Image: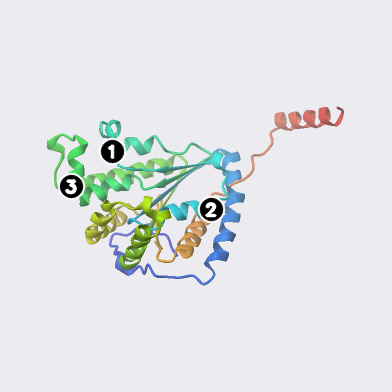
Amino acid sequence: MHALRSAVQFALRDHDPRVRLADAAARLEAGVARLAKLQPKLWAQDRWSVLLIFQGMDASGKDGVIRHVFRGVDPLGCEVTAFKAPHAEELDHTWLWRVMKRLPERGRMGVWNRSHYEEVVSVRVKPALLATQKLPHTLIGPKLFDERLEDIVAFERHLARNGTLVLKFFLHISKDEQRERLLARLEEPSKNWKFALGDLDDRALWDAHHAAYEAAIAATAQPHAPWWVIPADDKPTARALVVEAVVEALEGLDLRWPESLPAKQAELAEGLRRLQHE
C-alpha cells in the first residue's frame, strides 16, 4: 500500500475495495503495539504534532478504524474529533475556522472523523448546503470548489511547514458492502442508532460522491500531505493497513526521548540523592 503524493489523474475504480490480507489480525496487533511505543516519544519530544484525517462514504468503517488503531495510545496525548454538520456559530465564520480550532498542539495526535474535505465533497454534491454558508453572492461561481481545493493545499502546506505531520485516509468500500452494512444497522437493535434516512439519500448520490472525492484527492495529494486509499470491504484489512501507514510515517520523524541537559541531570541526581537518604 503506497501513499499518493501526487495524483493529477485519479480514479477510485483503479483501487479494489475488496482486498483482504490473510494476516490482517496479526499485522494490526503488531502495528498497535509499535504505535503505543512511538506515541510517548512524540509527546515527550514536543516538537511534532500529528494530524490524521479519515474520510469515506457512510458505513465505510471510520469509527471502527479509529477505535481499533488508536486503542493503545495514551488518551492524554490524542484527541479524536468527529465533525458533524456545522452549527450556527461555525457558519458565521470561514469554512476552515472550525477545523483550525481542533488542530493538535505539539506532541499530540489529532484524529479527525470527517474534516474540511466535507466542504469539497458533501457541499459540492448537495448545493443546498452551500446556501447555508452566508457567502456573498459575488463569491459563488464555477471556480468556487477549485478555489477551496487550492486553499486546502495551502492550509496543509502551512501545517507541514510548521511541524504538523498530515496523513489522510480514504476508506474505500464497494456499493454492495455498504448495502450490507446499512442493512445490519436496520436489522441489529444494537446498531439501530447508527442509521439515518440521510444515509440512503447519500447512497443515491454514490457516483457524484465518488466524482467529488476523486477531484479532491487528485488536487490535494501532495508530498507534505499524502492520501492513502484503503480497501475497506474487509474491516481487519483496513485497520491493519491504516496502522502500518501511521507507524511508518511516525518512524520517519526519528522521534527521540529528550536529552538531559546539565541542569536537568543535576536535578535528577539531587532527586535520587534525596530519595535514597529518606
Read off the residue under disc 1: 95
Q: Is disc 2 placed on a helix, strand or loop?
A: loop
Judged from this view, the residue extending furthest toward the left is 138
- Which one is nearer the viewer's eye here, 232 or 182? 182
In the image, residue 38 lies at what x, y percent? 59, 49
Image quadrant containing the N terminus: bottom left
Image quadrant containing the C terminus: top right
Q: What amino acid does circle 3 point to?
A: Pro
Q: Residues within 10 Å of mark 2 (few under 14, many from 20)?
A: few
In the image, residue 10 lies at what x, y percent? 29, 62
Say if 229 sits above or below 130 in the image. Answer: below
Q: What amino acid does circle 1 point to?
A: Trp
Calculate the distance from the C-alpha at mark 3 to the C-alpha at mark 2: 40 Å
Q: Decide which of tag 3 and tag 1 comes sooner along the chain.
A: 1
Q: Decide which of tag 3 and tag 2 comes sooner along the chain.
A: 3
Read off the residue under disc 2: 252
- Which one is nearer the viewer's eye here, 249 or 119? 119
